[in-house]
Amino acid sequence: MKRAFFIIAVAISLQLINCTAGEKFADLIVNSAGSDKSGSPPAGNGAYPTIISPLPGAQLEMLKAEFKEINPEFRGTLNKYGFIDDDIKPTMSMEHPDTILTDENLMNRRAKAMLLKNSKFTGVTDTTAMPINNSHSHGRGKLWRVWFQNQVYNGLGVKNTEIFVLLDANGVYRLSGNWYSYIFIPDEQISEEDAKNSIIGMEIKYTCWSIPGVHIVSEQDMKNPAGKVVLPQISGENIELKVAWQISIGSPAEWYVYVDIVTGEVLKIEQLWID
């Protein structure tokens, strides 16, 4: 079944705990399954998945004050997990210098410097090999946007961790997204073959040209090798960092099915075409 659609990622949730593509994940404070605010795993670590919880109110207020002291001109703040929160609404007026920006390397360096200076609040501890998706001017040349790719942790891509940095001649004025300084990567209990076999016969519901349909997953749908990724998911107030097989369905791929490498649970279906 072939469809000539633009290939983009549109998340379809199998569960209420799935997180949307636009969700901003944040925090370096976690329970016994994760790390402390320094990003270092505590003694006895090894619980799966890594769980990230909101910060206690007093601790969060202290961090907000620390962040403001480091970044007195930055209009953003910290979210409940302790990472930078892009809370600037489109309706907020903001004056920018009239300087036309042309030096891409300079803008990239400034963006990386902001992330590194605030590593405690961004999860970014090394920018030397930080890959950039796109870096370009906009706003009639007075503004610049740097778009960083998803984090790679111990060789695994971490979904939904792109970082966007907006700059003008004065420096960074908006920042959205974060990385995770510590993620527990468990040994796989579910092999790639077992993960694929477990979803044979699974129904994937979709809508094509406003007409609902159902695709039944077959062995022939999964000829491409699966890869392991880290998949952040919302569960109540917490963020859970799970490791999953990302299985391509169709050739070319029309969906990704994510299967937990420990539990075998289907965590999410991601549709790769739009109606």
Image (cartoon, helix red, strand yellow):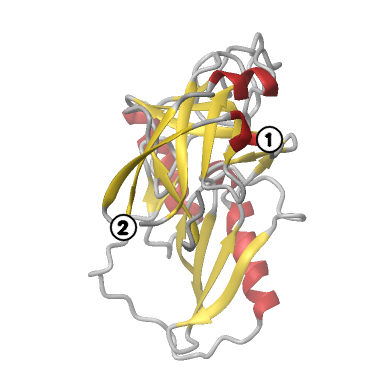
User: Crowding near pointer 2: few (<14 within 10 Å), some, many (20+)?
Assistant: few
Res. 243 image quadrant: top right
The Cα–Cα distance between marks 2 and 1, rounded to whole angstroms, is 30 Å
Report whether residue 181 is seen.
no
Q: What residue type is labelled 1?
A: Gly
Contact? badges 2 and 1 (CB < 8 Å): no
With respect to residue 173, does 144 lie above or below? below
Q: What residue type is labelled 2?
A: Trp
Q: Position of residue 120 (x, y in %)?
A: 56, 42
| Residue with the most extreme top position | 44
Res. 216 image quadrant: top left
Which element carries disc 2, helix, strand or loop?
loop
Q: Residue 20: give its label.
A: none
Which element carries disc 1, helix, strand or loop?
strand
Quadrant (top left, top right, bottom left, bottom right) of the C terminus: bottom left
Q: Residue at x 68, y 24 (%)?
A: 192
Labels 2 and 1: the sequence-earlier one: 2
Report whether residue 260 is seen.
yes
Please identify, in this view, whether the residue under mark 2 or under mark 1 is nearer the observer: 2
Q: Position of residue 227 (x, y in %)?
A: 68, 35
* Disc 1: which residue: 227
Q: Nearer the viewer, residue 252 or 190?
A: 252
With respect to residue 93, does 52 lie above or below? above
Q: Which of 87 and 226 is in front in this view?
A: 226
Q: Where is residue 87 in the image (x, y as percent from the top left)?
A: 32, 55
Res. 188 image quadrant: top right
User: Crowding near pointer 1: few (<14 within 10 Å), some, many (20+)?
Assistant: some
Q: Where is residue 83 in the image (x, y as percent from the top left)?
A: 46, 43
Q: Which residue is drawn at 42% across and 62% down?
A: 74
* Count of marks placed on residues: 2
* Disc 2: which residue: 209
